[in-house]
Amino acid sequence: MGSPQMNTLALAAAALLLSACGESNQYVAPPPPKVTVAKPLQRPVTRYLEATGNTSAVNSTDLVARVAGFIDQIDYQDGANVKKGTLLFTIEPEPYKVKLDQAKAAEVGAQANLKQAQQTLDRQTQLLPRESTTQANYDQALATRDSARSTLDQAQANTELAQLNYDYTQVTAPFDGTVTARQVSPGQYVGGTATPTVLASIVQNAPIYVNFTANEQDVLRVRAEILRRGLTPADLDKVPVEVGLQTETGYPHRGTLNYRSPTVDPSTGTLAVRAILDNADHVLLPGYFVRVRVPVTEDANALLVPDVSLGSDQGGSYLLTVNNDNVVEQRKVEIGPVTDGMRVIESGLAADDRVIVSGLLRAIPGQKVDPQVQTAANSAETAKTAP
C-alpha cells in the first residue's frame, strides 16, 4: 500500500477525470468548400460547317508520244516546275520534216494545176456563147477544174496533217505545273504501239482543289442561311473556306467555294462540295487529308463557358452552377462548338447563372459552397489550371 499522501493525490486526479467526462461534446461543421464561379461569357461567335477533306490537282495528265520515233532530247530536270509551252521532250523530228516538205511541194503542184484548169475553163466559158467551142469541151474543162480544186484541198489537208505530226515531235507542257520523273531515256523508241507511250506526267497544284462532303443537316442549315441572306449562285463562289493540315494549328490556308453537287447522295445523305485555294507556296500537295471549315452563321450573343468546366454522364453534358443560396446545382445543357478554349452553350444556361469553373472536385450537387467570383474573361485560363 502507498503512503496516505499519494492516495490523496490519486483520488484528486480521479475526481478531475470524472469531472471532465461529464462535460458535453459539441460537433463543429467544417466551412463550405471554396469554389471559383463566373458568369458565362457573352460575345459574337461564328458558326462553322466542319469537315475532313482531301486535296486534288486542278489539272493532272500523262504526257504521251503522239508520233513514233526515237527520243532525240529531254529538255527538263525531273520534278521541275515548268510553264505552259515549255519544251520537255523532242522525238526524232527529221522524218516528219521531210514528210512536211513533201506535202508542201504537192500542195504547190496542186495549186498550179488548179490555176491552169481555171484558165482553160475561163476560155471555154468565153467561147461557148459564140459557138466557137462545143458543150462537151466546156463540160470537160469544168470537170477538170473541179477535180483540180479537190486535189488542192486534199494536198492542203495532207500539209496540215504533216505539220501536226511534225509539231508532235516536240512535247511541251500543256499547263503550268510540276513534271514527274521521266519514264523514257534518250534513244528509246516510242509511239510505235497501239497503246501510247507515257513519257512523264505533269501535275498542277497551284491553285489546288479541296474536296469534302456536308451532311444533310448541314446542307439544310446552309440552305436556310442562303435564303435568309438572299445569296445567288454567283455569291456562293465568294464564300470563304479555311483549311488546315493535320499537323497544323488552326486553319492557315484560305480559299473559296468552287463547286457543289446539284444533288445529295441518297446512299450517304451527303453533298459533295469543292473549294479552290491559290496554294502559291505549294504547301498543299494532291492527296493530303485536311481539316476544312466554312463559316455559316454569326451568333451575336452566344453564351460561352470554359470547355473544361463541362461534365458528362449518361444523360449528356452538364454544368455545375451555384444558386442564390450558394447551393450547387447540376444543369443539363446542349453544347455547341469550341472557340479559343471556350464551349458554346446552346441551351440550358442563362446569362446571369454562376458557373463553377474551378474546384469542381469539391462541388457536390445539393451542398453549399463558398463561391469566389471571377470575371468571365479569366475563367477559361483559370479552369485550365484548376484541380
Image (spheres, grey):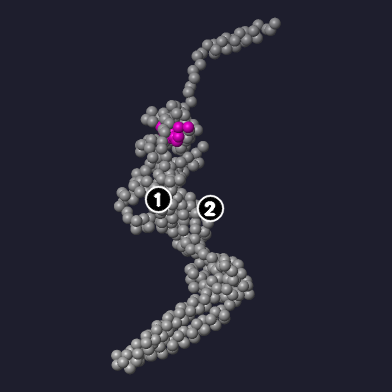
* Image: 46 above or below 20: below
Q: Give the percent coordinates (x, y) of residue 185.
A: 62, 71
Q: Main secondary structure of the magenta part?
A: strand
Comparing marks 2 and 1, which lies closer to the viewer? 1
The residue located at (38%, 41%) in the rendering is 303
- Location of residue 140 (image quadrant): bottom left
Crowding around mark 2 (Cα neighbors within 10 Å: few <14, some 14 to 19, many 20+) is few
Q: Give the percent coordinates (x, y) of residue 248.
A: 51, 53
Q: Is residue 220 magenta?
A: no
Along the viewing direction, whichever of 126 and 381 lies nearer the viewer: 126
* Image: 280 above or below 150: above
Quarter placement of the N terminus: top right
Q: Secondary structure at mark 2?
A: loop
Question: Of all residues shown, which one is farthest toward the right?
Answer: 1
Q: What residue did someone put label 2 on? A: 247
The residue located at (48%, 32%) in the rendering is 314
Q: What residue did someone put label 1 on? A: 263
Q: Amino acid at mark 1?
A: Thr
The residue located at (43%, 52%) in the rendering is 272
Along the viewing direction, whichever of 100 and 80 lies nearer the viewer: 100
The span shown in magenta is 314-322
* Image: 298 above or below 354: below
Asked whether the viewer can see residue 183, the reply is yes
The residue located at (57%, 81%) in the rendering is 94
Q: Is residue 347 left or right of residue 166?
A: left
Asked whether the viewer can see residue 370, the reply is no
Q: Give the percent coordinates (x, y) of residue 32.
A: 46, 28
Q: Give the percent coordinates (x, y) of residue 318.
A: 44, 34
Gap in Å between the C-alphas at discs 2 and 1? 33 Å
